[in-house]
Image (cartoon, coloured by chain):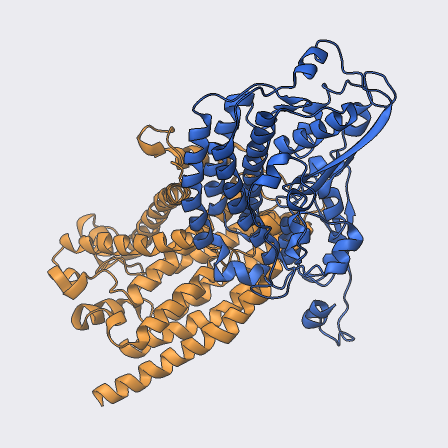
């Protein structure tokens, strides 16, 4: 961020306010561009992963090589589709719901460090900020479900509310364990710590429990199988976005993939070394510019490894029932998350003590 | 209902609640066709349900009274369109009984092999779609892979992939080619390995068991009261199979096979998992039957000589009536025919297993959740083409 501001003030000789605005606009613009490209790639990847798990090839025609242009073609198609609003729908809520859903998740990315210095704002309460801002998505989903004037949508929205709110407890609790180790909520600190001391996942055995709990809870937070109850195709048709079409519909699809990216980025940053390589090979965090951008590649590779596991699970496991989801969250994940936090605390007092 | 007490909150005096009517179908991903179920919901819990059928009614029985006996065979294909061979078989046996003829020995053995192959194909659909109902999409594609092999095998003698019109009164339309039996046996070898994969993927999955065990329990007296047959009945532990108890083809008396019944492995006897598991094991029994059938397949004609001559003019059985029932993948399919000497029957009636099995649904749904409703409908394995006819 500072580099960008310096570039605008120093090299181009602009005033400080203008430079600041331009720097943020550039940063957020490139973030949006990255996310759009990522989402298209992730949708294509999901289709390919699903296809190969299911003994198929998936898209093979559009664009030539393994159907790489399928996602842009679909996006183009969705943009030209009619935006149908059901009669009896609450139009205002129906219109803004996809935007709220999308913005909530998107806002989380401003605190994610992609590489040393490649971060829009290193917020002091970064982890807390991401958890809080990503929960706004639930409000959008409830708005979508309620305003659609469809019973299936309403069922989906209520399920989403119950599920996401319940699973925020174990996921937030599990994140306390790495926070205890580093002693900071600032996401940038996690990378510097891990460059120095190795990946947090290896810092103590309880961290594995925390990672597993967070991973499962984050699946529920992203509405991924086996927790895809709000969508539940075979039960609720499409859940809360049953009545949506065209571009508004695609925003919900996009949101799912973007929130997958967000939780995977958190998983990688907090547990799996962020943008550092194993054993701090090459010392990515302290490389001279522009080689520090290697960190972006490292983080993206790790993120896609986590996303692949999410996709793999989705195409393997059946869906749970709503009461089983609640049982899982409150009776199993939450106690295990608390155990991991307590274990981490005791371990570090005892080891360093 | 025990389940209802488990879920319901007692005191709601301070909250205003309203019953929600939910229309499940006729266009819904998991009603297996055009079934409509009107549900009264208390949150996620179903308090009452009412089945509405008839969206696929095509007057199949009335058509039977206006076409000749031979012309009606393709119409039976379209009743339970996932098990056309078995439908053809039941109709052919009924007409043969009316005429007092019997198919040649080779035709009988081939009929058995084809019917069992079609049973596997039908159960594969049941397995695959049940996976989708529970939320697992992958088993469906696995099932379709093996079903494709079966369809390719059945296409070779019949020329059709789904609606075969192959088994006809008097025997079979034509004989199989010389490599067919070898290929069927090769399929059997392959299928046994695949079957183990299905169980790893779905049958023994913890989430799947959690979703299906103890759900939709059908007690034995309800089975008798509703006239449920097939895997729905056997899932409740009743050992009754027409192939074993009333063999309608001679080969069934000679081959050796078991009748799998539900055992309450993961919960109560007669739950969704038991019905599912009965179907899975029936596929392996069918493989056993096919293997023995291929080994013992005799030579000779596949069409009765008398019938061949009769085919030149429309069949005109003498006045009389006949009823024959067969063990279809979904239960007992029966055809009742009354003839008065003309070229077509004056009454043609089908006793459809899906229809009788579906009559259980309204008593199973109250007290379950909407996700359970989908699991229960899937475990009954109905085909709406047969329910509505």
Answer yes or no: is residue B135 visible: yes
Question: Left or right of B197: which side holds B158?
Answer: right
Q: Nearer the viewer, residue B209 or B332?
A: B332
Q: Nearer the viewer, residue B382 or B69?
A: B69
Which quarter of the rendering shows the N terminus of chain A?
bottom left
Residue B57: x and y in percent read 77, 32
Which quarter of the rendering shows the C terminus of chain A?
bottom left
Residue B100: x and y in percent read 76, 25
Residue A211: x and y in percent read 35, 68
Q: Residue at x 16, y 60 (%)?
A: A284
- Numbered circles on residues, count: 0
Q: Residue at x 33, y 59 (%)?
A: A265
User: Quarter of the image holding residue A81?
Assistant: top right
Answer yes or no: is residue A146 visible: no
Q: Nearer the viewer, residue B15 or A125?
A: B15
Q: Residue at x 22, y 72 (%)?
A: A193
Q: Nearer the viewer, residue A87 or B160?
A: B160
User: Quarter of the image holding residue A302?
Assistant: bottom left
Q: Residue at x 76, y 66 (%)?
A: B17
Question: Left or right of B45: which side holds A116?
Answer: left
Q: Is residue A170 above or below residue B234?
A: below
Q: Colour of chain B?
A: blue
Q: Colour of chain A?
A: orange
Question: Left or right of A278: which side holds A142?
Answer: right
Residue A127: x and y in percent read 37, 69
């Amino acid at each position: 961020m500072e580099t960008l501001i310096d570039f605008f003030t120093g090299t181009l000789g602009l005033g400080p306010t203008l430079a600041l605005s331009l720097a943020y606009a550039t940063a957020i613009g490139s973030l949006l561009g990255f996310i759009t490209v990522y989402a298209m790639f992730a949708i294509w990847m999901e289709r390919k992963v699903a296809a190969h798990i299911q003994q198929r090839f998936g898209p093979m025609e559009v664009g030539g090589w393994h159907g790489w242009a399928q996602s842009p073609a679909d996006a183009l198609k969705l943009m030209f589709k009619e935006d149908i609003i059901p009669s009896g729908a609450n139009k205002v809520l129906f219109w803004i719901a996809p935007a709220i859903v999308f913005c909530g998740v998107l806002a989380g990315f401003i605190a994610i460090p992609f590489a040393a210095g490649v971060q829009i704002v290193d917020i002091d309460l970064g982890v807390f900020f991401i958890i809080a801002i990503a929960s706004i998505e639930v409000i959008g989903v409830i708005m979508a479900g309620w305003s659609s004037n469809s019973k299936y949508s309403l069922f989906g929205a209520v399920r989403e509310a119950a599920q996401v709110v319940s699973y925020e407890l174990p996921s937030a609790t599990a994140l306390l364990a790495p926070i205890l180790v580093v002693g900071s909520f600032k996401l940038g600190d996690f990378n510097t710590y891990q460059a120095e001391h190795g990946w947090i996942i290896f810092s103590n055995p309880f961290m594995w429990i925390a990672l597993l709990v967070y991973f499962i809870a984050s699946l529920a937070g992203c509405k991924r199988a086996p927790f895809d109850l709000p969508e539940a195709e075979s039960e609720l048709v499409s859940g809360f976005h049953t009545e949506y079409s065209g571009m508004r519909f695609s925003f919900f699809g996009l949101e799912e993939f973007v929130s997958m990216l967000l939780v995977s980025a958190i998983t990688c940053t907090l547990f799996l070394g962020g943008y550092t390589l194993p054993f701090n090979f090459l010392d990515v965090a302290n490389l001279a510019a522009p080689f520090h951008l290697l960190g972006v590649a490292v983080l993206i590779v790790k993120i896609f490894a986590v996303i692949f596991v999410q996709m793999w699970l989705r195409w393997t496991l059946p869906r749970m029932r709503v009461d089983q989801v609640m049982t899982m969250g409150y009776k199993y994940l939450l106690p295990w998350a608390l155990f991991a936090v307590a274990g981490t605390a005791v371990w570090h007092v005892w080891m360093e003590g | 209902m025990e389940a209802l007490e488990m879920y319901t909150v007692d005191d709601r005096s301070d909250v205003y609640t309203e019953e929600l009517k939910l229309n499940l179908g006729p266009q819904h991903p998991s009603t297996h066709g055009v079934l409509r179920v009107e549900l009264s919901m208390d949150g996620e819990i179903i308090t009452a349900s009412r089945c509405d059928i008839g969206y696929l009614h095509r007057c199949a029985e009335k058509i039977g009274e206006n076409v000749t006996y031979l012309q009606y065979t393709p119409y039976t294909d379209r009743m339970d369109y996932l098990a056309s061979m078995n439908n053809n078989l039941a109709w052919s046996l009924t007409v043969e009984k009316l005429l007092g003829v019997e198919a040649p020995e080779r035709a009988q053995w081939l009929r058995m092999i084809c019917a069992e192959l079609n049973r596997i194909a039908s159960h594969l659909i049941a397995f695959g779609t049940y996976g989708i109902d529970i939320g697992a999409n992958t088993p469906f594609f696995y099932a379709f892979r093996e079903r494709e092999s079966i369809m390719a095998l059945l296409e070779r003698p019949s020329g059709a992939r789904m609606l075969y019109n192959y088994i006809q009164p008097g025997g079979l339309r034509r004989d199989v080619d010389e490599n067919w039996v070898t290929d069927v046996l090769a399929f059997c070898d392959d299928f046994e390995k695949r079957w183990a994969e299905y169980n790893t993927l779905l049958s023994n999955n913890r989430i799947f068991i959690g979703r299906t065990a103890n759900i939709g329990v059908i007690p034995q007296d309800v089975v008798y009261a509703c006239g449920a047959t097939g895997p729905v009945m056997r899932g409740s532990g009743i050992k009754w199979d027409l192939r074993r108890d009333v063999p309608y083809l001679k080969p069934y008396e000679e081959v050796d096979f078991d009748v799998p019944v539900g055992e309450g492995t993961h919960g109560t006897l007669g739950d969704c998992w038991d019905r599912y598991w009965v179907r899975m094991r029936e596929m392996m029994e069918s493989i056993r039957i096919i293997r023995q059938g291929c080994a013992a397949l005799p030579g000779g004609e596949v069409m009765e000589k008398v019938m061949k001559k009769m085919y030149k003019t429309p069949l005109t059985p003498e006045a009389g009536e006949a009823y024959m029932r067969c063990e279809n993948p979904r239960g007992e399919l029966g055809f009742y025919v009354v003839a008065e000497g003309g070229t077509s029957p004056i009454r043609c009636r089908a006793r459809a297993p899906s229809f009788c099995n579906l009559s259980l649904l309204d008593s199973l749904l109250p007290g379950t959740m909407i996700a359970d409703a989908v699991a229960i409908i899937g475990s009954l394995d109905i085909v709406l083409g047969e329910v509505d006819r």
